[in-house]
């Protein structure tokens, strides 16, 4: 058998409720940052592909937005992107935040919709007679008897072929999960070069890094009313020059993003610039602008720039 004939390749759709730990898990399995991560829900807005190698198997993880009850056009596009990620995948991996599912609260002790959102996903899988793998995440926050009881309860849904107990944050159980996925990968050629870690343009990656810094720096609700677009990208002798626009929905939000004397925007820009320089392996010269655009979350052009399909 030739080396090519030994190859295996699998597409794995990683789905779950907002803040279940999908992006943290994909980053850990890939071994590099391919998705932005914050403590706020609904950080991921579009599908991101992260690529990992395990032996002869190439594993392509599709990190999807959290599935929740949508309100805006943006929300509908995000949820549609998550469900679409399942189509054509070799495996569907549902991530459930085990403590939040049991208590109805997130890790900050705030009331959340984790259980309802997770149950809605399970119901969706049941309706289509789809099978999935289940990963109970954040197991370090629960006693084992409770985890086993939860696993037994969820197994009764008739959807899951295998159940894993993991901690995406500290790595518990990830080796077994990755080995299992590699073993189940169907024979076939690799779709990407062995050294490629993700499938996204540099412009979108840069916009996402800046958006991550917005989520980390700004008050609770404002990041959901903002988006970032890369307007210009120029390679220079001194590195790369990147022009970006931060769009907000109201004029009052522009002042919050800018901060007194532009201090907040400067902090956001510096943090994004440092990380982009590290990711690109060369100096990133980042220039940020803030514009008010009411209703941007319902504009087809804005959604397409994020890599989302427009949903009416």
Image: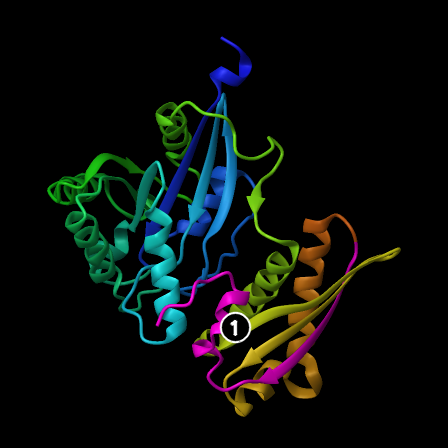
| Residue at x 32%, y 42% (from the top left corner) | 93
Residue 28 visible at all: yes
Query: In the rendered structure, does residue 22 fall within the stretch colored magenta?
Result: no
**Which stretch appears magenta?**
283-312
Residue 170 visible at all: no
Q: Residue 60 location in percent, x, y?
A: 46, 38
Q: Residues within 10 Å of mark 1 (few under 14, many from 20)?
A: few
Indicate left or right for 18 with 151 as reference.
right
Is 9 situated above or below 28? above
Indicate left or right for 158 with 220 as reference.
left
Residue placed furthest toward the bottom: 251
**Residue 298 occupies which quadrant of the picture?**
bottom left
Indicate the secondary structure of the residue bearing disc 1: helix
Q: Residue 201 location in percent, x, y?
A: 62, 53
Q: Which residue does the numbered mark 1 point to in the structure image?
A: 301
Is 31 situated above or below 288? above
In-front residue for pair 20/13: 13
């Amino acid at each position: 058998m030739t080396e090519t004939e030994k190859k295996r390749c699998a597409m794995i759709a990683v789905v779950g409720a907002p803040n279940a730990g999908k992006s943290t898990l994909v980053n850990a399995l890939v071994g590099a940052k391919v998705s932005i991560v914050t403590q706020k829900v609904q950080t991921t807005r579009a599908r991101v592909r992260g690529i990992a190698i395990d032996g002869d198997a190439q594993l392509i993880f599709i990190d999807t937005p959290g599935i929740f009850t949508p309100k805006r056009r943006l929300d509908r596009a995000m949820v549609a992107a998550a469900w679409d990620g399942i189509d054509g995948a070799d495996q569907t991996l549902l991530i459930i935040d085990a403590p939040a599912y049991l208590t109805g609260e997130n890790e900050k002790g705030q009331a959340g919709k984790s259980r309802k959102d997770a149950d809605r996903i399970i119901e969706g899988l049941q309706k289509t007679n789809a099978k999935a793998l289940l990963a109970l995440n954040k197991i370090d926050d629960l006693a084992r008897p409770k985890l086993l009881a939860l696993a037994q309860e969820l197994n009764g849904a008739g959807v899951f072929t295998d159940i894993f107990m993991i901690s995406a944050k500290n790595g518990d159980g990830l080796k077994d999960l990755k080995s299992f996925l590699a073993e189940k990968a169907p024979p076939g050629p690799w779709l990407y070069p062995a050294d490629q870690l993700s499938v996204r343009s540099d412009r979108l990656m840069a916009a996402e890094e800046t958006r991550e810094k917005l989520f980390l720096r700004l008050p609770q609700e404002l990041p959901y009313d903002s988006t970032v677009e890369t307007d210009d990208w120029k390679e220079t002798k001194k590195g790369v020059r990147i022009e970006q626009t931060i769009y907000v929905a109201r004029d009052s939000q522009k002042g919050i993003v800018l901060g007194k004397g532009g201090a907040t925007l400067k902090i956001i820009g510096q943090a994004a610039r440092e990380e982009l320089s590290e990711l690109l392996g060369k100096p990133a010269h980042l220039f940020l602008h803030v514009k008010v655009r009411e209703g941007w979350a319902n504009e087809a052009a804005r959604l397409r720039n994020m890599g989302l399909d427009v949903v009416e």
